[in-house]
Image (cartoon, grey):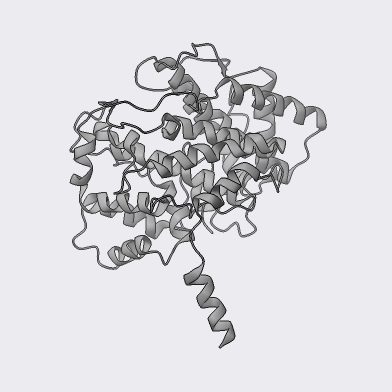
Amino acid sequence: MKKILIVFLFIFLIPTLSFADFKEIKKKAVVNNPEIIFPIKKDKKKCISDLFISPDINYVKPILKVKAPSGYGLDDRFDNALSKFEDFSFPCSGGNIEACKNVKRVILEWAKANAAQRTGPSDGEGRHWNDTLTVNLYIASPMMAAYSFAKQVIKVTEVEDKIIKDWFKRIVKRNEHLMYKYSNYKLGSGANGTPKRAHNHALSSAMSHMQLGILLSDKKLFRKAFKNFEAAIKHQRKDGSMPIETRRGGRAMFYQARAMNALAVIAMLAENQGYNIWDYEYKKKNYHNIVKFFIDFTENNEIVFKYAKSMKYPGPAKNYKKQDLSSRSSSNWGWLYAYASRFPDHENVQRLKKWSQNKSNLNSYQWDIVHHYLNIEKKPFGSASWTVVEPNCHFTK
């Protein structure tokens, strides 16, 4: 009876992480597991561990300078380089020794070449935004995570380690875009009063800083992302929509998903160092609420129209009534693998479970989210730009 009472108290009386608790983590968190960004899983059944391509034909050539457009878009050369790099980094993350040797070789070549130099302005305008996101998204975050995996499998000399880490420091610092000094969005922006540090670009920069902090055992760098995470949670709307992202026309939910991925990664990086920020709550606003809005949208896509019609930077998706979520890439759905495996009994996940048991009346958006719910711990993704690592292996519990 005593044991039952203790379990009851733990489940029902322990509050969610309060603002005061989170403030303490934000100020005092340290790196408890240096260099372990994501640990290599002991159970590798759901991980890619085979090296399918020869290094001789998969040369990941260093790209020296970043040249993103000043309008919409990134420097796609780096996306292509990441695709090639993932042929090594994915099996390395599954413990493949040969793949990890190639991960180290590629990163060392890029470091020695001082690749990914940002030569554009630092004026907060289009090219600056796109250059910094290019490097943080396609190079800094995935390569730091891969290097962490490699160091868990193979030896790296002190000289090599210094060359690589010095390069990581340069590219993360040069592409810092945390937006702490930016003013909040103004009236007419579609995100009035929201701090720009809640933007998906800022969250991407936060992920890079947090990972660099783990690699260097630098608590100040590690803590930086908490400020961005806090802003995104605090400044969601009551319905769970994210103001900065959902104003973007036909890509409103496309960008909400990317921000959700970034928040999930930050929560997992904290988790891997011994801190639970998943349940951080501010005035009844939390990550669960953001997830609920996304699931609500899949059932009734019209709920985002009142925000999406602002048509702020929609890219190619000009019709706000047709949300661009057709892709089954990790960029749209990776967050679900982390969330559903940690909160299987939450009403959000139970709702998906119910849908998966009766698919007859599902719309196309519901089909997509149910597909991913049923795919958890099964088929891996082929790419991982907004998730840093392959989600079905490293996001699931």
Quadrant (top left/top right/bottom left/bottom right) for the N terminus? bottom right
| Image quarter of residue 253 | top left
* Residue 155 x, y percent position in the rendering: 78, 40
Left/right placement of residue 235 relative to residue 271 reads: left
Between residues 251 and 368, which one lies in front from this camera angle?
251
Q: Please report the residue visible at 71 percent of the width from the left and 24 percent of the height from the top.
A: 166
- In the picture, measured across the screen, residue 294 lies left or right of residue 82, that is left
In the depicted structure, whether residue 192 falls above or below residue 344: above
Q: Is residue 394 visible?
A: no
Question: Visible in this render: residue 52?
Answer: yes
* Number of callouts: 0
Q: Position of residue 65 (x, y in %)?
A: 55, 14
Q: Position of residue 210 (x, y in %)?
A: 60, 37
User: Which residue sits at x=33%, y=48%?
Assistant: 240
Q: Quadrant of the C terminus?
A: bottom right
Viewed as shown, does residue 201 lie left or right of 299?
right
Residue visible at 49% across and 11% down in the picture: 121
Q: Quadrant of residue 328?
A: top left
Residue 281 versus residue 306: which sits nearer the camera? 281
Q: Is residue 177 left or right of residue 31?
A: left
Percent position of residue 198, x then y = 43, 35
Q: Is residue 370 above or below residue 119?
A: below
Q: Residue furthest front?
A: 20
Q: Residue furthest right?
A: 158
On screen, residue 367 above or below 242: below
